[in-house]
């Protein structure tokens, strides 16, 4: 077992971390054993908001485990706007995690929605995370689908679920349902409401 320094600093975890699914209990236990034996090998990523408040934006599971074990951890700073930070979180999780096609589409759709809310709050207009110079909705959809590694249809369904039923989007991210099943439920619920 490695020797560790006691935990010196604590942070809050940014809401953007909720874009990605939580680790399963088995994954978390495996990570906990590894951290107990070897310490944290990959630094947690910290981002400072406009008020200078530091937030964990990558490494929430490592952070939670370090708190449990009362051991310190390495960090590195992400510099950029809140919207750029969301793009970083999405990119890190899409590359590193073993996500299904539905989960990747839902993560991307949730990130776009979160990014848009940050842009609106900051009084800025702009395109969703990752959409650069595309001027049409179809081009934007194609770009998002490509970045998530999914079809345009799957990305369109994920966006529909994000707009109509954010709680169903979270179910997709957690692996409890698929994008197509959630989109069908949203359509059925919407049509059911119109009929009454």
Image (cartoon, helix red, strand yellow):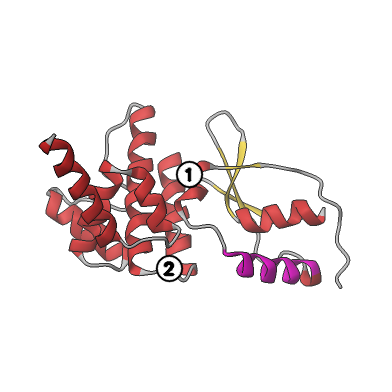
Label 1 Cα neighbours within 10 Å, binned few <14 / some 14-19 / many ≥20: few
Query: Horizontal and vertical percent for residue 144?
Result: 26, 57
Q: Secondary structure at mark 1?
A: loop
Q: Secondary structure at mark 2?
A: loop
Query: Horizontal and vertical percent for residue 107?
Result: 38, 55
- Magenta span: chief secondary structure: helix
Comparing 19 with 185, the one in front is 185
Closer to the N terminus: mark 1 or mark 2? 1
Q: Would you say 130 lies left or right of 192 here?
A: right
Q: Which mark is residue 99?
A: 2
Q: Which residue is located at x 14 percent, y 48 percent? A: 135
Q: Which residue is located at x 69 percent, y 53 percent? A: 64
Q: Would you say 68 lies left or right of 86 here?
A: right
Q: Which residue is located at x 27 percent, y 67 percent? A: 150
From this view, report whether residue 118 is shown above or below residue 131: above
Label 2 Cα neighbours within 10 Å, binned few <14 / some 14-19 / many ≥20: some
From this view, report whether residue 189 is shown above or below residue 24: above
Magenta stretch bounds: 24-36
Question: Mark 1 or mark 2, which is nearer to you?
Answer: 2
Quadrant in the picture for residue 55: top right
Which image quarter holds the C terminus? top left
Q: Which residue is located at x 36 percent, y 61 percent? A: 177
Residue 22 colored in magenta in the image: no
CA distance separating discs 1 and 2 = 26 Å
Which image quarter holds the N terminus? bottom right
Q: Which mark is residue 80?
A: 1
């Amino acid at each position: 077992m490695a020797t560790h320094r006691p935990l010196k600093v604590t942070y809050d975890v940014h809401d953007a971390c909720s874009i990605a699914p939580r680790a399963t209990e088995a994954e978390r236990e495996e990570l906990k054993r590894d951290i107990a034996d070897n310490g944290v090998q990959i630094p947690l990523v910290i981002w400072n908001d406009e008020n200078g408040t530091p937030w964990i934006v990558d490494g929430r599971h490592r952070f939670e485990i370090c708190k449990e074990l009362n051991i310190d951890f390495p960090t590195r700073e992400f510099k950029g706007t809140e919207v750029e930070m969301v793009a970083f979180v999405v990119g890190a999780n899409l590359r590193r995690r073993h996500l299904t096609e539905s989960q990747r589409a839902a993560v991307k759709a949730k990130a776009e929605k979160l990014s848009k809310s940050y842009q609106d709050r900051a009084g800025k207009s702009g395109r969703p995370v990752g959409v650069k110079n595309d001027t049409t909705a179809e081009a934007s959809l194609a770009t998002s689908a490509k970045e998530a590694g999914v079809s345009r249809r799957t990305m369109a369904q994920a966006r529909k679920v994000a707009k109509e039923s954010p709680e169903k989007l979270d179910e997709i991210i957690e692996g409890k349902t698929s994008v197509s099943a959630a989109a069908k439920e949203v359509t059925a619920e919407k049509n059911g409401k119109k009929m009454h």
